[in-house]
Image: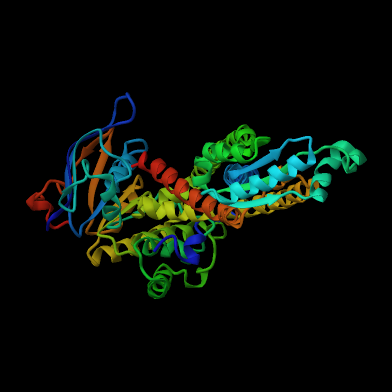
Amino acid sequence: MAGIVQFENVGLRYGTGAETLSDLSFSLAQGSFYFLTGPSGAGKTSLLRMLYLSQRPSRGSIRLFGEDVVQLRRARLPGFRRRIGVVFQDFRLIPHLSAFDNIALPLRIAGVDERDLVTPVREMLAWVGLADRASARPPTLSGGEQQRVAIARAVIGRPEILVADEPTGNVDPEMAARLLHLFDALNTLGTTIVVATHDIHLLSRVASANVMRLEHGQLQDPTGALRYPPRADAEGHG
Amino acid sequence: MLGASQADRRLLPEGRLAGPMPWVIAIMMFLTALAAAAGLAMGDAAHRLGGDLGRQVTVQIVAADPGVRDREADAAQHVLANQDGVSGLHKLGGDEMQALLQPWLGDAGLDRDLPLPAMIDVDLTDAGRARLDRIAAALVVAAPHARIDDHASWLAPLVALIRSLGLLAGGIVAMMVGATAAAVVLAARSALNTHRQTIDVMHMMGSTDAQVARLFQRRLALDALFGAVVGLVGAIVVILGIGRRLGEIGSGLVGSITLPWTAWAALLALPILAGLLALAVARITVQRALARTL
């Protein structure tokens, strides 16, 4: 398995304060499932933001898909972002668009013809159990439904990496299990999954998942799976 | 592709004419069209005054004796008709002279005993204008009482004034274009702030700056086009009203201030130019703002 993500000595500092994240060095294997856990304020969201190219690190190197993205020209970022699906903690659905249009947005951005996107979007709505809510707007959807629209939007473009920030934070345990099942199903199709959560009960829900733990801005590696190549006893994960 | 379809237009949900920009553009266009009309009319008037009227002279035979006056007038016409550069001659008849004098002399101008000079309007070509001194010299030999009244000599300051007013109008138009562009910049920045969340989401999904800019430039250009059409319609009403008043004055000089069809065409093109200006300014503004983000 190739390292689809590689962080080397990455540090992140906001303004002139102390580093929020320090000395992050790890590699994520392509097609694997990772949980990123840690207490609130540990820096999970900051790490994810660097991963989905919303934030540049203050120092260190980040390689995505084999290319250094820290020095990447801004004009090339969209091409990389289209290969990454993101489920935001607060969903970030566009409130005036229907569920259908929210899910179709990545395809429209990618230039897919209107005639060609109807079928995949309807299939995706059915996949997340919202086939009958296609025309509903986010404010009229429940938290769980919004979450599923956000997930459908993140995966409609068949991203190579899916990043989800606390995707189960706003849903009940039954819905959380269902969402994790969706991620697992996507993972079996070859997508690398990174799910940030502070809910340790989720970690056992995906048998093949590796665990990354952030504490005080530094990464712990309880399974040894983050080194690349992975440690021998961790290769069974993912 | 974003920026083209109905679905993409739904990304920016505000209705048409949201915010003050279209109405600000309407006011700008109203003033711009008035200034442009003034500038174009002044330019046309200056051109015609400097051209047609500037190539005219009037020959006066100032002799008290009617016999001498008539004889020299005939001689003067004969000399002028044989000069290079003279394209037309017209000796004013008695009725025309009386019509000229009547506003100043009243009925006294109709008195046959009042000694009046003989007057000959002469049209010159550009070449004739250049050799006016030689024409005058030949004229004086044939008609010693002849005097030449060169229209260009008294029209020159007026033409200069009209040209200055035309330039001033042009300057006002330029300032209005700048102010219109500034209004579009402010509207684009406001729209960016209003739709910041949508833009962030689009960026995270791989939208390019050009795709985002297309959404805004289309909206702002259409708003500007609407405002410009409203402003131009108002200005045309005013221009037609002023033209009617000028026509009622009946003065030759004031009457020379008219709008040729090319000027009307230029005025009608202003809304399209305003739309294109808004399109370009919005695109540049949005792309510059986005370039400051990651």
Q: Nearer the viewer, residue B229 or A55?
A: B229
Residue at the spot 39% in from the left edge and 55% down from the top edge: B211
Residue at the spot 44% in from the left edge and 60% down from the top edge: B3
Image-quadrant location for residue B287: top left
Image-quadrant location for residue B1: bottom left
Q: Is residue B215 left or right of residue A109?
A: right
Please state, as top left, top right, bottom left or bottom right, where the C terminus of chain A lies in the image: bottom left
Q: Nearer the viewer, residue A48 or B86?
A: B86
Question: Residue A46, position in %: x, y?
Answer: 32, 39
Farthest residue toward the right?
B107
Q: Nearer the viewer, residue B39 or B17?
A: B39
Q: How many marks?
A: 0
Does residue A174 sit above or below B228 in this rendering?
A: below
Image-quadrant location for residue B153: top right
Question: Residue A144, position in %: x, y?
Answer: 47, 58
Q: Nearer the viewer, residue B212 or B231?
A: B231
Q: Is residue A167 left or right of residue B115?
A: left
Does residue B236 sit above or below B179 in this rendering?
A: below
Whether residue B190 appears in this view of the structure is: no
Question: Residue A177, position in %: x, y?
Answer: 37, 60
Please state, as top left, top right, bottom left or bottom right, where the N terminus of chain A lies in the image: bottom left
Residue at the spot 35% in from the left edge and 65% down from the top edge: A111
Whether residue A16 appears in this view of the structure is: yes
Q: Is residue A221 left or right of residue B249?
A: left
Question: Residue A139, position in %: x, y?
Answer: 56, 56
Q: Is residue B201 left or right of residue B68?
A: left
The colour scheme used here is rainbow
